[in-house]
Amino acid sequence: MKTPNFYLLSFVLALAPACAKPPQSSHELYAAVAMTGAQKNSSTPTDSGLYRLHSDGSWQPFGPRVLGVNSVAVQPGSDGRVMLVASGDGVLRSTDAGQSWRLTTGWDVMDVRTFAVNPSNPNEFYASTCWGPLRSTDGGATWQHAQAGLNLLFCQTVVADSQTPGRVLLGTEDGIYLSTNGAKTWSRTDSPPATALRMVQSGVNPQLMLAGTQGRGVWLSRDAGETWMPTDSGSAENNLYAAALDGHSAANMAVGGWGAGVRVSADGGKTWSDRSAGLPTKNIFVLAFDPDVANRLWVSTFEKGFYRSDDLGKTWQESGLMGSYGFDFVFVQSSN
């Protein structure tokens, strides 16, 4: 395995003190917390690895009590009742808004990383795992392997095109692959022969996509993932686990990684600036732009907790769960 072995470690999280109360939001923010500092080797985890940001600014545990929670997804149109959790054990599913959970994958599926959902069919989900991509056509109740056309199976990131149903992009050890038939078959794109660690699509301009790679820097696509071009040579030697595009402006983008800190572009990737000043470490695993507040960035640092910036990373403030680090931030449309 070429990435740090954080997903199978035990974790116990103590609730962080309340931070500054965030403004009213139309989205709920979930954090998949994979590990925490002094408690990472605990043999008796008692708290969930999934947390939800409370209206008072504190983080509350939410979800199944299993090891290695990596991400979460909520089925569109289900009023928050149907939820999926990606974990080291496989995919867990809830049909009662997180009150109870059931493992929906078998022994042959381990270490699920991320989810994507077909925008035209809320029952169709895709998942990236260390053993290849998965596909579900029944809202995550059952899963099938979807590996046809792949040279290498390890995949860490998957994106369903928001504009074209059945069009899916997958980040693998061999570069970025494209499916035009709902993950039934795959073909390689014009992308670098490197592991794509995080890939995102712009909500403002769906033709724009950003990918962070393992040791090959940042790659940008302006044709919805058909072709890719390198950008930001300053981070080329780092493992970039975090990549984010601003839903308020196609010009704003950010990447982060191990030793790379937070790097931000405000001109569509032409120039990049180091925005790590004010953070306790330059080891970054998660970045996300807030869909409700312009210029707001959320970041998870390695074992130093969460931070928030309201000015594209020029300044930072502590935002809870200090001593921990997260594997994913997911914004979900509020059902209230």
Image (tube, rainbow, N blue to C red):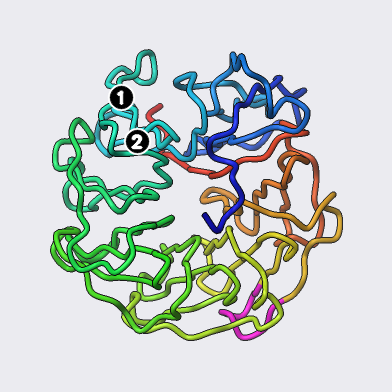
Mark 1 sits on what residue? Answer: 103
Q: Quadrant of residue 190?
A: bottom left
**What element does badge 2 sit on?**
strand
Decide: is 311 above or below 74: below
- The answer to whether residue 267 is magenta is yes
Q: Position of residue 157 (x, y in %)?
A: 41, 57
Q: Amino acid at mark 2?
A: Val
Taken as a whole, is the magenta stretch helix, strand or loop? loop
- Magenta residues span 265-272
**The C terminus sits in image quarter:** top left
- Disc 1 is placed on an element classified as strand
Amino acid under disc 1? Leu
Whether residue 31 appears in magenta in the rendering, the answer is no
What residue is rendered at 68% in x and 75% in y? 235
Residue depicted at 54% across the width and 68% down the height: 212
The quarter holding residue 312 reads: bottom right
Q: Classify 66 as above or below 174.
A: above
Mark 1 or mark 2: whose residue is earlier in sequence: 2
Q: Is residue 84 left or right of residue 317?
A: left
Q: Position of residue 95 (x, y in %)?
A: 27, 21
- Residue 71 screen position, x and y as percent: 46, 40
C-alpha distance separating marks 1 and 2: 16 Å
Q: On the image, numbered disc 2 is attached to which residue?
A: 74
